[in-house]
């Protein structure tokens, strides 16, 4: 019954040790990455849908597009504003990668940050990286 | 305030009317434009696609190789050096293997040694579609038996079901074995079955299949249910045979022998 001090010191040491990773990494969180747009994407101003919707729901859009193209051979998407898009990830100038040809800066940055491994590129062929722009 | 039944009913009536107008107003508000999905205007359409291969126009394997190459090149079909990993969408075989039920001891020499082009038959009653547990293989309205590679889990039931051996399995990652990648078409990944797709991606942009284009007129492609089509014309004027008809699969590839 006289080990009160030892127990308390032990508990404190245990607590510090267990939470060490948090202390160690405090203030070092990686900043949220900014997606970089290509010149072509900047000029177009708006994607298939508004930016916020695309950010949150591009995976659902890609999923419905895939079913539509593969199953029904419907390959043209006309958005609310009447603009036409080729419903393809990587084929053609009016496809997703036709505009966003900078996969490393546009896709990978956020997916790496969020630790989401997309398997698109297991089969679809990546667009060639554009020449590096000076920073 | 006096609360009579009369005033309550009045109020309820007006409220109901108000609620009723909301959907109407919404309809007016959203009338601007709705997102739409369409086919490309130049897409080729048919009730049922079919192919007629005129084998009289072929003499040796040399005549067929460019056709096979054309197909495999545009579809990123890998060229494995190991025979058991081989992947084919369209390939060359001999009479006794292609027409097993029509082969006999005294088949004439020309047919006996003639190389035949074989590919997926895009059957009327495809066994592969029935067995696919994920609906990765399906039949389109125009008769094309197509695969959604995204959904294939590599169970290979379809390979067991297909009586024509039209399907191949990617035992290895195909990427390193593709000599020249066609950027317009995806590759496959390891663990996925693949087969001829009747060039669905070309039909969608108004082009005929690659093998038809590469055959110098020896292969015809068209609508089986259109009595004026090229294939119907050929079928009317020539005796044709199909593979393993007794199985009832209803193959759509016809051979003029």
Image (tube, coloured by chain):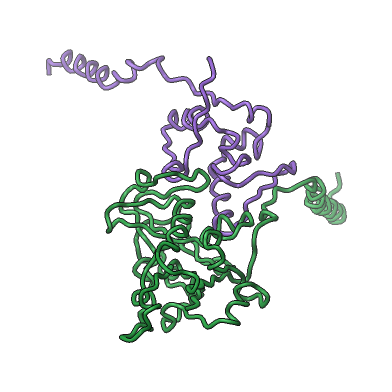
Chain colours: A purple, B green
Which residue shows up at 60% across the image and 34% down it? A99
In this rendering, is residue B55 above or below B88?
below
In front: B244, or A97?
B244
In this rendering, is residue B216 above or below A24?
below
In front: A65, or B99?
B99
Q: Position of residue B93 (x, y in %)?
A: 37, 69
Q: Residue furthest left?
A: A2
Q: Position of residue A118 (x, y in %)?
A: 44, 40
Left or right, A58 with reference to B76: right
Which residue shows up at 29% across the image and 18% down it? A20
Quarter of the image where the N terminus of chain B is located: top right
Based on the displayed image, in which of its 4 quarters is residue A122 positioned? top left
In this rendering, is residue B243 above or below B171?
below
Left or right, A102 with reference to B174: right
Which residue shows up at 63% across the image and 41% down it? A94
In front: B58, or B182?
B58
In this rendering, is residue A118 above or below B168?
above
How many numbered marks does the figure carry? 0
Q: Position of residue B85 (x, y in %)?
A: 30, 56
Left or right, A120 with reference to B42: left
In front: A25, or A132?
A132
Q: Position of residue B71 (x, y in %)?
A: 47, 56
Based on the displayed image, in which of its 4 quarters is residue B228 positioned? bottom right
């Amino acid at each position: 019954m006289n080990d009160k001090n030892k127990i308390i010191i032990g508990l404190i040491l245990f607590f510090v040790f267990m939470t060490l990773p948090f202390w160690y990494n405090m203030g070092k969180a990686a900043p949220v990455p900014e997606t970089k747009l290509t010149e072509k994407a900047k000029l177009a101003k708006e994607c298939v849908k508004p930016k916020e919707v695309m950010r949150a729901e591009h995976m659902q859009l890609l999923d419905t597009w895939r079913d539509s193209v593969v199953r029904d051979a419907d390959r043209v998407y006309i958005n609310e504003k009447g603009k036409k898009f080729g419903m393809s990830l990587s084929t053609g100038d009016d496809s997703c990668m036709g505009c966003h040809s900078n996969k490393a800066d546009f896709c990978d940055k956020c997916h790496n940050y969020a630790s989401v491994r997309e398997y698109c590129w297991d089969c679809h062929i990546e667009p060639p990286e554009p020449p590096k722009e000076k920073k | 305030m006096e609360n009579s039944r009369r005033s309550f009913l009045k109020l309820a009536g007006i409220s109901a009317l108000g609620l009723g107008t909301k959907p109407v107003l919404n309809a007016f508000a959203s009338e601007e434009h709705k997102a739409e999905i369409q086919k490309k205007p130049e897409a080729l359409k048919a009730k049922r696609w079919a192919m007629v291969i005129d084998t009289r126009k072929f003499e040796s394997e040399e005549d067929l190789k460019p056709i096979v190459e054309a197909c495999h090149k545009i579809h990123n079909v890998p060229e494995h050096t190991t025979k058991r990993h081989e992947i084919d969408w369209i390939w060359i075989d001999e009479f006794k293997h292609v027409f097993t039920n029509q082969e006999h001891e005294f088949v004439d020499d020309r047919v006996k040694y003639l190389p035949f082009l074989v590919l997926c038959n895009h059957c009327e009653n495809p066994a592969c579609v029935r067995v696919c547990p994920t609906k990765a293989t399906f039949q389109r309205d125009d008769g094309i038996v197509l695969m959604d590679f995204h959904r294939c889990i590599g169970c290979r039931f379809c390979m067991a079901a297909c009586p024509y051996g039209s399907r191949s399995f990617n035992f290895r990652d195909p990427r390193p074995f593709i000599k020249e990648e066609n950027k317009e078409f995806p590759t496959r990944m390891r663990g996925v079955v693949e087969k001829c797709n009747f060039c669905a991606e070309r039909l969608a942009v108004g082009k005929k299949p690659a093998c038809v284009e590469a055959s110098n007129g020896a292969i015809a492609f068209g609508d089986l249910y259109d009595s004026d089509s090229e294939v119907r014309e050929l079928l009317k004027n020539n005796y044709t045979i199909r593979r393993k008809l007794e199985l009832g699969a209803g193959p759509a590839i016809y051979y003029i022998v």
